[in-house]
Amino acid sequence: MALVKMKTLLTHAAEQGIGCGAFSVGNMEMVKGAVQAAEELNRPMILQIAEVRLKHSPLALMGPMMVQAAREAKVDIAVHLDHGLTIETVQKALDLGFTSVMLDASTLPFDENIAKTKAVVQLAAEYGATVEAELGLVGGSEDGSADHGIQCTDPKDAEIFCRETGIDALAVAIGNAHGNYSAAPKLAFDVLEEIHKAVPQPLVLHGGSGITDEDFQRAVSLGIRKVNIATASFNKLTMYAEEYLKSEGRHNYFALNEAMVRGTYDNVKHHIEVFSTPYACK
Protein backbone atom coordinates (compact mmCIF):
# COMPACT_ATOMS: atom_id res chain seq x y z
CA MET A 1 0.00 0.00 0.00
CA ALA A 2 1.88 3.08 1.18
CA LEU A 3 3.75 5.14 3.71
CA VAL A 4 0.97 7.25 5.25
CA LYS A 5 0.36 9.86 7.93
CA MET A 6 -0.43 8.49 11.37
CA LYS A 7 -3.43 10.82 11.51
CA THR A 8 -4.94 8.95 8.56
CA LEU A 9 -4.65 5.60 10.34
CA LEU A 10 -6.10 6.94 13.59
CA THR A 11 -9.01 8.56 11.77
CA HIS A 12 -9.83 5.25 10.07
CA ALA A 13 -9.49 3.41 13.38
CA ALA A 14 -11.96 5.82 14.99
CA GLU A 15 -14.43 5.27 12.16
CA GLN A 16 -14.22 1.51 12.73
CA GLY A 17 -14.18 1.72 16.52
CA ILE A 18 -10.89 -0.18 16.77
CA GLY A 19 -7.31 0.51 17.83
CA CYS A 20 -4.18 0.78 15.69
CA GLY A 21 -1.05 -0.93 16.96
CA ALA A 22 2.16 1.10 17.22
CA PHE A 23 5.12 -1.25 17.44
CA SER A 24 8.58 -0.20 18.53
CA VAL A 25 11.47 -1.71 16.58
CA GLY A 26 15.19 -1.81 17.14
CA ASN A 27 16.67 -3.79 14.26
CA MET A 28 15.96 -5.21 10.82
CA GLU A 29 14.47 -8.40 12.21
CA MET A 30 11.87 -6.46 14.20
CA VAL A 31 10.90 -4.40 11.18
CA LYS A 32 10.52 -7.54 9.07
CA GLY A 33 8.49 -9.38 11.69
CA ALA A 34 6.14 -6.47 12.36
CA VAL A 35 5.45 -5.82 8.68
CA GLN A 36 4.93 -9.53 8.02
CA ALA A 37 2.27 -9.72 10.74
CA ALA A 38 0.43 -6.63 9.49
CA GLU A 39 0.47 -7.87 5.91
CA GLU A 40 -0.80 -11.32 6.87
CA LEU A 41 -3.72 -9.78 8.78
CA ASN A 42 -4.22 -7.10 6.12
CA ARG A 43 -4.22 -4.42 8.83
CA PRO A 44 -2.45 -1.05 8.87
CA MET A 45 0.01 -0.31 11.67
CA ILE A 46 2.57 2.14 12.99
CA LEU A 47 6.31 1.45 13.11
CA GLN A 48 8.03 3.55 15.75
CA ILE A 49 11.25 4.06 17.64
CA ALA A 50 11.89 6.02 20.84
CA GLU A 51 14.82 8.37 21.26
CA VAL A 52 16.18 6.42 24.26
CA ARG A 53 16.71 3.47 21.91
CA LEU A 54 18.91 5.39 19.50
CA LYS A 55 22.18 4.60 21.32
CA HIS A 56 21.62 0.96 20.31
CA SER A 57 19.65 1.61 17.12
CA PRO A 58 20.91 4.84 15.49
CA LEU A 59 18.23 6.90 13.81
CA ALA A 60 20.40 7.40 10.71
CA LEU A 61 20.32 3.62 10.18
CA MET A 62 16.88 2.68 11.52
CA GLY A 63 14.98 5.61 10.03
CA PRO A 64 15.58 4.93 6.33
CA MET A 65 14.92 1.21 6.85
CA MET A 66 11.60 1.86 8.60
CA VAL A 67 10.48 4.37 5.99
CA GLN A 68 11.42 2.11 3.08
CA ALA A 69 9.72 -0.88 4.69
CA ALA A 70 6.54 1.18 4.95
CA ARG A 71 6.78 2.28 1.32
CA GLU A 72 7.10 -1.29 0.11
CA ALA A 73 4.52 -2.85 2.44
CA LYS A 74 1.25 -4.35 1.22
CA VAL A 75 -0.64 -2.43 3.93
CA ASP A 76 -0.65 1.20 5.02
CA ILE A 77 2.06 1.98 7.57
CA ALA A 78 2.94 5.20 9.39
CA VAL A 79 6.47 5.77 10.75
CA HIS A 80 6.63 7.56 14.09
CA LEU A 81 9.29 9.02 16.39
CA ASP A 82 8.16 8.04 19.88
CA HIS A 83 9.18 10.02 22.97
CA GLY A 84 11.49 12.44 21.21
CA LEU A 85 13.63 14.27 23.75
CA THR A 86 15.01 17.14 21.68
CA ILE A 87 13.79 19.28 18.81
CA GLU A 88 16.96 18.28 16.94
CA THR A 89 15.92 14.62 16.97
CA VAL A 90 12.40 15.54 15.88
CA GLN A 91 13.87 17.54 12.99
CA LYS A 92 16.10 14.64 11.95
CA ALA A 93 13.18 12.20 11.98
CA LEU A 94 11.13 14.53 9.79
CA ASP A 95 14.04 14.95 7.39
CA LEU A 96 14.31 11.16 7.13
CA GLY A 97 10.68 10.90 6.08
CA PHE A 98 8.90 10.03 9.33
CA THR A 99 5.21 10.81 8.97
CA SER A 100 4.65 11.38 12.69
CA VAL A 101 6.67 12.76 15.60
CA MET A 102 6.40 13.22 19.34
CA LEU A 103 8.40 15.49 21.62
CA ASP A 104 7.74 14.30 25.16
CA ALA A 105 7.53 17.36 27.42
CA SER A 106 5.14 15.71 29.88
CA THR A 107 7.51 16.08 32.84
CA LEU A 108 7.63 19.87 32.39
CA PRO A 109 5.14 22.36 33.84
CA PHE A 110 1.84 22.57 31.94
CA ASP A 111 2.62 25.88 30.20
CA GLU A 112 6.07 24.69 29.11
CA ASN A 113 4.60 21.47 27.76
CA ILE A 114 2.17 23.54 25.70
CA ALA A 115 4.89 25.87 24.41
CA LYS A 116 7.28 23.10 23.35
CA THR A 117 4.50 21.07 21.79
CA LYS A 118 3.25 24.06 19.79
CA ALA A 119 6.76 24.50 18.39
CA VAL A 120 6.76 20.88 17.22
CA VAL A 121 3.31 21.26 15.67
CA GLN A 122 4.56 24.26 13.69
CA LEU A 123 7.67 22.37 12.57
CA ALA A 124 5.79 19.21 11.61
CA ALA A 125 3.29 21.24 9.59
CA GLU A 126 6.12 22.09 7.17
CA TYR A 127 6.40 18.36 6.41
CA GLY A 128 2.69 17.53 6.58
CA ALA A 129 3.42 15.23 9.53
CA THR A 130 1.24 14.15 12.44
CA VAL A 131 2.09 15.25 16.00
CA GLU A 132 1.51 13.29 19.19
CA ALA A 133 2.03 14.74 22.66
CA GLU A 134 1.65 13.48 26.21
CA LEU A 135 -0.16 15.01 29.17
CA GLY A 136 0.05 13.58 32.66
CA LEU A 137 2.80 11.19 33.71
CA VAL A 138 3.02 7.66 32.36
CA GLY A 139 5.13 5.62 34.77
CA GLY A 140 8.63 4.36 34.02
CA SER A 141 10.55 5.04 30.84
CA GLU A 142 11.17 3.28 27.54
CA ASP A 143 14.56 1.92 28.65
CA GLY A 144 13.90 1.63 32.39
CA SER A 145 16.37 4.38 33.23
CA ALA A 146 13.87 6.74 34.89
CA ASP A 147 10.52 6.83 36.63
CA HIS A 148 8.72 10.08 37.38
CA GLY A 149 5.78 8.25 38.90
CA ILE A 150 2.23 8.09 37.58
CA GLN A 151 -0.05 11.11 37.44
CA CYS A 152 -3.36 10.65 35.68
CA THR A 153 -4.22 13.11 32.94
CA ASP A 154 -6.72 15.76 34.03
CA PRO A 155 -9.64 15.85 31.54
CA LYS A 156 -9.99 19.65 31.87
CA ASP A 157 -6.27 20.15 31.28
CA ALA A 158 -6.50 17.78 28.29
CA GLU A 159 -9.18 19.94 26.70
CA ILE A 160 -7.09 23.10 27.11
CA PHE A 161 -3.88 21.37 25.99
CA CYS A 162 -5.39 20.00 22.78
CA ARG A 163 -7.04 23.29 21.91
CA GLU A 164 -3.91 25.37 22.55
CA THR A 165 -1.39 23.08 20.83
CA GLY A 166 -3.32 21.81 17.82
CA ILE A 167 -1.92 18.29 18.19
CA ASP A 168 -3.29 15.32 16.27
CA ALA A 169 -3.15 12.69 19.03
CA LEU A 170 -2.91 12.80 22.83
CA ALA A 171 -1.10 10.21 24.94
CA VAL A 172 -2.84 9.90 28.30
CA ALA A 173 -1.85 8.62 31.72
CA ILE A 174 -4.50 6.42 33.32
CA GLY A 175 -2.34 4.17 35.50
CA ASN A 176 -0.27 2.76 32.66
CA ALA A 177 3.54 2.55 32.73
CA HIS A 178 6.43 1.77 30.40
CA GLY A 179 8.45 -1.40 30.73
CA ASN A 180 7.56 -4.64 32.51
CA TYR A 181 4.69 -4.59 35.01
CA SER A 182 5.07 -6.67 38.17
CA ALA A 183 1.31 -7.25 37.84
CA ALA A 184 -1.32 -6.11 35.37
CA PRO A 185 -2.06 -2.43 36.13
CA LYS A 186 -5.42 -1.12 37.32
CA LEU A 187 -6.38 1.36 34.64
CA ALA A 188 -8.57 4.36 35.48
CA PHE A 189 -11.25 3.82 32.87
CA ASP A 190 -13.44 6.51 34.45
CA VAL A 191 -10.70 9.07 33.80
CA LEU A 192 -10.25 7.81 30.25
CA GLU A 193 -13.97 8.15 29.58
CA GLU A 194 -13.95 11.77 30.79
CA ILE A 195 -10.92 12.61 28.64
CA HIS A 196 -12.60 11.03 25.61
CA LYS A 197 -15.64 13.23 26.19
CA ALA A 198 -13.50 16.34 26.62
CA VAL A 199 -11.27 16.16 23.53
CA PRO A 200 -11.94 15.26 19.88
CA GLN A 201 -8.39 14.05 19.18
CA PRO A 202 -7.58 10.32 19.06
CA LEU A 203 -6.13 9.08 22.35
CA VAL A 204 -2.93 7.07 22.79
CA LEU A 205 -2.10 4.40 25.36
CA HIS A 206 1.59 4.06 26.19
CA GLY A 207 3.05 1.25 28.28
CA GLY A 208 0.94 -1.39 26.59
CA SER A 209 3.15 -4.41 27.32
CA GLY A 210 1.56 -6.34 30.19
CA ILE A 211 -1.95 -4.89 29.98
CA THR A 212 -4.59 -7.61 29.62
CA ASP A 213 -6.32 -8.18 26.30
CA GLU A 214 -9.68 -7.33 27.86
CA ASP A 215 -8.37 -4.04 29.25
CA PHE A 216 -6.92 -3.16 25.84
CA GLN A 217 -10.29 -3.70 24.24
CA ARG A 218 -12.10 -1.75 26.94
CA ALA A 219 -9.65 1.15 26.51
CA VAL A 220 -10.23 1.10 22.75
CA SER A 221 -13.99 1.27 23.36
CA LEU A 222 -13.36 4.47 25.35
CA GLY A 223 -11.38 6.35 22.69
CA ILE A 224 -7.89 4.83 22.61
CA ARG A 225 -6.92 4.67 18.94
CA LYS A 226 -3.13 4.15 19.10
CA VAL A 227 -1.67 1.48 21.38
CA ASN A 228 2.08 1.36 21.95
CA ILE A 229 3.82 -1.99 22.25
CA ALA A 230 7.58 -2.10 22.84
CA THR A 231 8.76 -4.23 25.78
CA ALA A 232 6.62 -7.22 24.82
CA SER A 233 8.20 -7.36 21.36
CA PHE A 234 11.74 -7.01 22.68
CA ASN A 235 11.04 -9.72 25.27
CA LYS A 236 9.51 -12.12 22.74
CA LEU A 237 12.38 -11.60 20.28
CA THR A 238 14.90 -12.31 23.05
CA MET A 239 13.02 -15.42 24.16
CA TYR A 240 12.93 -16.87 20.64
CA ALA A 241 16.62 -16.09 20.15
CA GLU A 242 17.49 -17.78 23.45
CA GLU A 243 15.45 -20.86 22.54
CA TYR A 244 17.26 -21.14 19.21
CA LEU A 245 20.72 -20.75 20.76
CA LYS A 246 19.88 -23.42 23.37
CA SER A 247 18.80 -25.89 20.70
CA GLU A 248 21.05 -28.76 19.68
CA GLY A 249 23.40 -28.59 16.74
CA ARG A 250 25.45 -25.84 15.19
CA HIS A 251 23.99 -22.36 15.12
CA ASN A 252 24.26 -19.66 12.48
CA TYR A 253 23.20 -16.06 11.94
CA PHE A 254 20.57 -16.87 9.35
CA ALA A 255 18.56 -19.17 11.58
CA LEU A 256 19.00 -16.67 14.44
CA ASN A 257 17.67 -13.96 12.15
CA GLU A 258 14.58 -16.07 11.44
CA ALA A 259 14.03 -16.72 15.16
CA MET A 260 14.09 -13.00 15.94
CA VAL A 261 11.71 -12.25 13.07
CA ARG A 262 9.29 -14.94 14.35
CA GLY A 263 9.40 -13.57 17.89
CA THR A 264 8.44 -10.10 16.73
CA TYR A 265 5.88 -11.43 14.25
CA ASP A 266 4.07 -13.51 16.87
CA ASN A 267 3.83 -10.64 19.33
CA VAL A 268 2.72 -8.06 16.77
CA LYS A 269 0.15 -10.41 15.23
CA HIS A 270 -1.42 -11.15 18.60
CA HIS A 271 -1.74 -7.49 19.52
CA ILE A 272 -3.14 -6.42 16.15
CA GLU A 273 -5.84 -9.07 16.53
CA VAL A 274 -6.64 -7.85 20.06
CA PHE A 275 -6.84 -4.20 19.06
CA SER A 276 -9.14 -5.05 16.16
CA THR A 277 -11.61 -7.03 18.30
CA PRO A 278 -14.54 -5.12 19.87
CA TYR A 279 -14.83 -5.06 23.65
CA ALA A 280 -17.21 -7.61 25.06
CA CYS A 281 -18.57 -6.22 28.34
CA LYS A 282 -18.62 -8.89 31.06
Image (tube, rainbow, N blue to C red):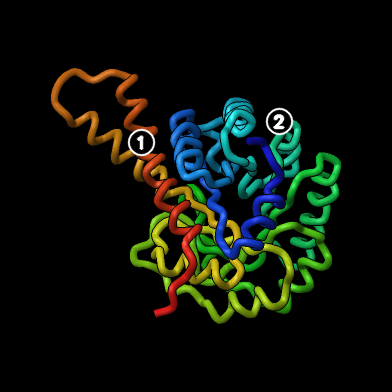
Can residue 105 be seen in this snapshot? no
In this orientation, which residue lies closer to the viewer: 111 or 277? 277
| Residue 9 in sight here | yes
Disc 1 marks a residue whose amino acid type is Arg
Residue 208, image x and y in percent?
A: 47, 58
Mark 1 element type:
helix
Q: Quadrant of the C terminus?
A: bottom left
Q: Earlier in the sequence, mark 2 or mark 1?
A: 2
Along the line of sight, the residue nearer the viewer: 153 or 64: 64
> Considering the image in quadrants, where does the N terminus appear?
top right
Q: Position of residue 268 (x, y in %)?
A: 44, 46
Residue 40 image offset from top left, x and y in percent: 45, 40
Which picture quadrant has residue 112?
A: bottom right
- Picture layout, residue 103 above or below residue 217: above
Q: Which mark is residue 96?
A: 2
Task: Classify mark 2: residues with Cα within 10 Å, few (<14), some (14-19) or many (20+).
Answer: some
Disc assigned to residue 262 = 1
